[in-house]
Image: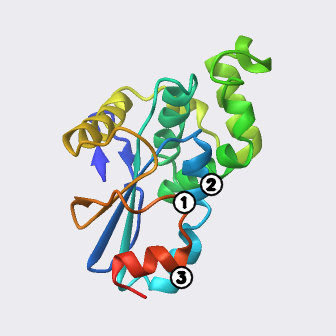
Amino acid sequence: MTTDSSGYKADPLVWGHGPVALEIFVEPTCPFSARTFGKLDELLARAGEDRLTVKLRLHSQPWHQFSPAVTRAILAASTTPGGKTAARTVMAAVYAHREAFDLTEHRTGPNLDQSIRGILQLIERYSGIEVAKAFELPGLDREMKWHARYARQNGIHSSPTFMVNGMVMPDMSSGDSVDAWLGKLGLA
C-alpha cells in the first residue's frame, strides 16, 4: 500500500497469500486481458489462497486510446474505502463493457469523440464506484508510473503477460484453461 503526502492510500491489487506468486500484467481494455481476468476467481478458488498469491499489474498500452485514463481510474478506485475490491469492481465493469472504452480497430467508431470525463462517467455508471474525485488526486500518477516502470524492468511488452515467482512465463496465455494454469504453477 502506498501513502501519498496528500494522505491517500492505494491498495495493492493482490489476492491470496500463498508462496507461489503469480503476477499478471493486464491492459484494462484488452480483450485478452479480459479473458484472463475472468478466470481469476476460479484460479484462486481452486489453487487456494494459502497456496497462491495473485498480483495484478496494470500495463497500459498506447494503441488502446483510453487505456491511461482507465488505468488511472482503476488505481483511483483502489484509494477509495473499498480499496482493491473497488478497483476489481471497476476492472470487471470495464471488461464487461469493453467496447465503450476503446475505439473500433483502435482508430475510429462511436467513441472517437469521447472525453476523459465521459470515460469516468461510464466507469461510475457501469461499476457503481465513484472514481471521478479520486481520479484527481495529486500524486496518483506515481502509482501509474510504478506499474509502467515495473513492467519495463521485467521486459513486459504485451498483455496479458504472466510472471511466476519473478520469472516471465511465455508459455502461459489467456487462452489456457485454469487447469493448464494450475499445472504450470505446480498447483494441480
Q: Give the amino acid type for the residue marked by disc 3 in the picture.
A: Ala
Figure check: 26 above or below 179: above
Q: Is residue 130 left or right of residue 70?
A: right
Badge 2 is on which residue? 89
SS class, disc 2: helix
Q: CA distance from mark 2 to mark 3?
A: 18 Å
Of marks 2 and 3, which one's residue comes earlier in the chain?
Answer: 3
Q: CA distance from mark 3 to mark 1?
A: 16 Å
The structure residue drawn at horizontal position 44% and vertical position 79%, both measured from the top left corner, is 182
Q: Quadrant of residue 86?
A: bottom right
Circle 3/circle 1 CB separation < 8 Å: no
Residue 85 got which mark?
Answer: 1
Q: Give the amino acid type for the residue marked by disc 2 in the picture.
A: Thr
The structure residue drawn at horizontal position 36% and vertical position 47%, both measured from the top left corner, is 9
Q: Residues within 10 Å of mark 3 (few under 14, many from 20)?
A: few
SS class, disc 3: helix
Q: Nearer the viewer, residue 145 or 170?
A: 170
Q: Quadrant of the C terminus?
A: bottom left
Q: Position of residue 47 (x, y in %)?
A: 45, 84
Residue 45 got which mark?
Answer: 3
The structure residue drawn at horizontal position 49% and vertical position 41%, both measured from the top left corner, is 27
Circle 1/circle 2 CB separation < 8 Å: yes
Q: Quadrant of residue 60?
A: top left
Q: Residues within 10 Å of mark 1 (few under 14, many from 20)?
A: some
Q: Position of residue 14 (x, y in %)?
A: 39, 63
Q: Is residue 115 left or right of residue 150?
A: right
Q: Position of residue 139 (x, y in %)?
A: 33, 29
Furthest residue to the top? 113
